[in-house]
Image: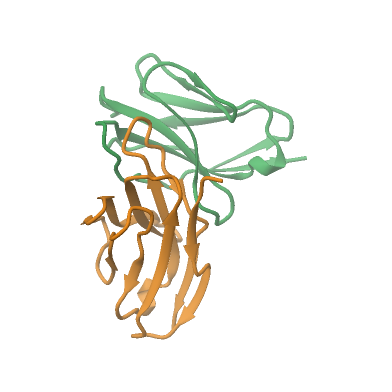
Amino acid sequence: DAKTTQPPSMDCAEGRAANLPCNHSTISGNEYVYWYRQIHSQGPQYIIHGLKNNETNEMASLIITEDRKSSTLILPHATLRDTAVYYCIVRGNTGTASKLTFGTGTRLQVTL
Amino acid sequence: EAQVTQNPRYLITVTGKKLTVTCSQNMNHEYMSWYRQDPGLGLRQIYYSMNVEVTDKGDVPEGYKVSRKEKRNFPLILESPSPNQTSLYFCASSAVRPRHEQYFGPGTRLTVT
């Protein structure tokens, strides 16, 4: 699986959009970009994933660059409850489930 | 409610005393997995199971055993716990297809003295 690089920490004001970047310059053609988050020491929570098109769901949007070497997770209106560590994970999607390789992630602090 | 449950949530034990951490999911998922999380090392996979009676080692299997006799349950067994197994443990499950995002349990904090 390709390696990812994320900033160690970011701050965001409540109500503003939080844009979390991720570099994955060695991603291969069949690898997807997944985002998970972990609030305090709870179990990680799936947010969104995509291959090459931008994706949106009720939690967030995922913007993947055309060359697929980087992506941005967007929380459109961050709240205090979005304070968490966010993990960007690149993984093949061969049709069978497999492990997730978590890096160190980005610690997002949402403030008043 | 779809969920992964783990028990116990907190456990303090002594070196060498066998213990089992249970994991159960109610989503009929084929895939189940155990991770441990340690400061500075992130989450690392211990064992996983693709279906009933099918288990395999992850990245850090030493000192652990698992079994998958039923689809919903995937217990983690520490036959002779040691202090270096003090960690936060997470069980996860997912469908094999189509999306197979993983659902995680709430975690079990284990301390071995």
The figure's colour scheme reads by chain
Report the front residue among A21 and A1: A1
Residue at screen point 64% across, 25% down: A76
Q: Residue furthest top?
A: A66
Query: How many numbered marks have been drawn onto this rendered protein structure?
Result: 0
Could you say which quadrant of the image residue A80 lies in?
top right
- Which chain, by letter, is green? A
Residue A55 on image: x %, y %? 48, 20
Report the front residue among B89 and A66: B89
Could you say which quadrant of the image residue A92 lies in?
top left
Specify the quadrant that holds the C terminus of chain B.
bottom left
Residue A89 vertical placement versus B86 (above, below): above
Residue B110 on image: x %, y %? 46, 72
Residue A10 vertical placement versus A16 (above, below): below
Residue B41 on image: x %, y %? 39, 57
Asked if residue A90 can be seen in this view, the reply is: yes
Asked if residue A102 can be seen in this view, the reply is: no
Residue B25 on image: x %, y %? 44, 52
Of the chain colours in the picture, the one used for chain B is: orange
Residue A4 vertical placement versus B17 (above, below): above
On screen, residue B40 versus residue A80, left or right, reads left
Q: Residue furthest right?
A: A112
Residue at screen point 36% across, 57% down: B34
On screen, residue A58 versus residue A6, left or right, reads right
Residue at screen point 46% across, 17% down: A54
Residue at screen point 46% across, 35% down: A35
